[in-house]
Image (cartoon, rainbow, N blue to C red):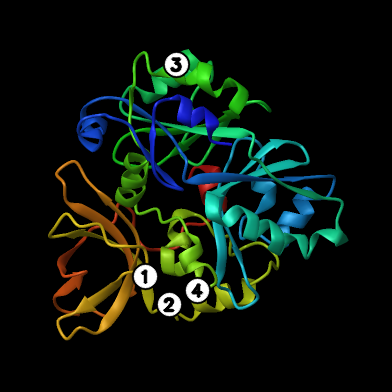
Amino acid sequence: MQDWITELGARTLADDHITFDTQDAARQALDATVVTPLLQFGVLDVVGADAEKFLQGQASAQLNLVDGAIAPLTVFCTPKGRMLANAQLLRVVEGHYRLILHRDLVDSLAEHLKKFAPFYKVELKPRSDLALIGLIGQAARALAEVRLGIAPPAIWHQAGDADTQLLAHPGPRPRLLAILPIARAMAVWQTLTEQATPVGNAVWSLHDIQAGLGWLTSHHRDALLPQMINWEALGGISFKKGCYTGQEVVARAHFRGQVKRRLMRGLLDGSVLPEIGSPVQDAQDKTVGEVIAAELDAYDQVEVLVVMSTKEDIGALNVAGQALKLLKLPYPVERLDPEHLAAGT
C-alpha cells in the first residue's frame, strides 16, 4: 500500500509517521504551502443497495445529509456508547459511501460492522489501493484547483468525482485532503511539489491538534463517549435522527449533562513527546486525564490534546514531568447540529 510513499524519498519513523529531510517542517507550514502523504489515515468503503440504510443504523451521522456535497464527521459506538472509531463520511456515488479514519481502526471497524451486514445488501471494503495527500497553506486551495482540476469545497464538504475526492478540514491554515488511486499518486505528487514543500505527516497532525480535532486510535478504542472528544461540538452527532448503535447512551449523556471529561488543548513546557495514553497529573500526582495526541510545533514545544476532568480550579498540571498549560479551543464546546451545518446556519 505504501510503496509509493517510499518512492518519494520519505523516511518511515513509525507505522503511521513518516518524514522528509525538510528543515523546520512545522515552520514551513506557517509561511509557505506544504504537502504531505497522510499515512495516519485509512479508508473503509461501504457499498451496496442498502448502504445508506445500513449506515443510518450504525453511524451518528444523518445519512440523508451525506449527498455528495456534505461530508460530515461521524462516530461508531458500542451499545454502551463507547467509541469504536470516529471518521469523516462522504458519498462517492449513489450506494457507495467512504469513511476516512485512523488507519489502525479500519480493520476492527470493518469486523464490527460485518456483524450487522448479513441483514443488508452491503459490502465492506478496506481500501489499500487509495492514497491520501494533504495540502496546508494559503495557496493550498489555488494549487489544488490548478493541479487537481477540482474547485475546493467548504470545510466538512467534498468535491471531485468517483475517481478523486477533495475534502476541506479546519485549522489555523487552509487544509485540503485529496483521495485518489495510488496508481495516480506519484504523478499528482510531482505536480504538487512544484509549488509546495514536502513535509512529514506530523505537520498535518499538529494542525489537527490546533483545530481541536481528535482522531481515535486503537489505544482509546471502546473507552470514551463521543462527547469526551467534543464530537457534538464539531457537528459529528445528530440528535435528530433515529436509533443507531449506542444512541441511547450518547443522547442520555448529552441531555442529562453527564459528561465529566472533555477534550482540551494544551502546551507542554518541554520538547519531549509523551506517548498516547500518558497520564495528565495534578500537583498531588493524581491522574485527572490522558493524552490522545501530541506533536512538536514550529517552536519545538509540544502541543497536545488531552481528555481530562472538567472540574474547575484543578490546579497545576503536568504530563511526563512537563508542566501543562491549557489553551483555548478554536470552537465553543456546545452542540452543533449537523443539520444546521448542512444548511449553512
| Mark 1 crowdedness (10 Å alpha carbons): few <14, some 14-19, many ≥20 | many
User: What residue is pinned by disc 1?
Assistant: 262
Q: Are marks 2 and 1 in contact (CB under 8 Å)?
A: yes
- Residue under the image location 60 percent in, 78 percent down: 80
Question: Viewer-proximal residue, 198 or 168?
Answer: 198
* Separation (CA) of disc 2 from disc 4: 13 Å
Query: Which of label 1 and label 4 is nearer to you?
Result: 4
- Tag nearer the camera, 2 or 4: 4
The kind of residue tagged 2 is Val
First-in-chain label (4 vs 3): 3
Amino acid type for the residue under numbered disc 3 = Gln
Q: Circles 4 and 3: CB distance less than 8 Å?
A: no
Q: Give me the C-alpha separation between circle 2 and circle 3.
A: 47 Å
In the rendered view, does 8 fall on the left or right side of 304?
A: right
> For the residues marked 2 and 1, what is the alpha-carbon distance in whole angstroms?
7 Å
Q: Which residue is mark 4?
A: 223
Q: Secondary structure at mark 1?
A: strand
Amino acid identity at mark 1: Arg
